Amino acid sequence: MEIEVKEIIKLEDGKQTGKIVGVQERKDPFHYIDVIIQPDKAGFQIKVGYPAHLSADSRLGCLLQRFGAVLVVKEKVDPAVFLHDKECEFVTIGKKGKDGNDYANVVPESLKPKKE
């Protein structure tokens, strides 16, 4: 089997734009909600995780409120439905992985709706 070697695609540090294409729940090793973003300038997707605790001042709650959610105590919100297909802005910073390669990481507090 032959597989073509592709060029390394990198996101430069700084402000990016894109679209939220999915939201996944992750429970190992901790309970997190991962938001999956398709950056406008990249041929790959990038994830940013938020602890799955939802309140008006939690990281996940603040994210949903930035996108216009109204959080009411004891009511339920589905982040996957609420955030799906939203145009967004975010900031990335490069970080070295355990393998020594540089990877773009989304600053969680920077994810917000795209300005018109």
Image (cartoon, grey):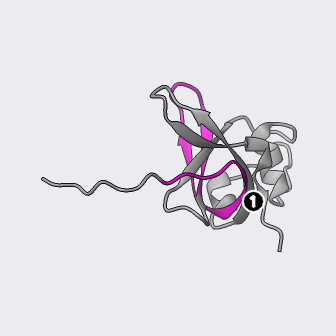
The residue type indicated by label 1 comes to Glu
**Residue 68 falls in image quadrant:** bottom right
Question: Alpha-carbon neighbours of circle 1 within 10 Å: few (<14), some, or many (≥20)?
Answer: some
Q: Which residue is drawn at 85% across and 43% down?
A: 73
**Residue 56 falls in image quadrant:** top right
Residue 72 is a magenta residue: no
**In the rendered view, does 47 fall on the left or right side of 59?**
left
- Magenta range is 9-37
Q: Image height check: is 82 above or below 105?
A: below
Which residue bears the numbered disc 1?
89
The spot of residue 81 in percent (x, y) is 64, 60
**In the rendered view, does 28 fall on the left or right side of 13?**
left
Magenta stretch, main secondary structure class: strand
Q: In which quarter of the image is the C terminus?
A: bottom right
**In the rendered view, does 46 fall on the left or right side of 72?**
left
Q: Which residue is drawn at 65% across and 64% down?
A: 18
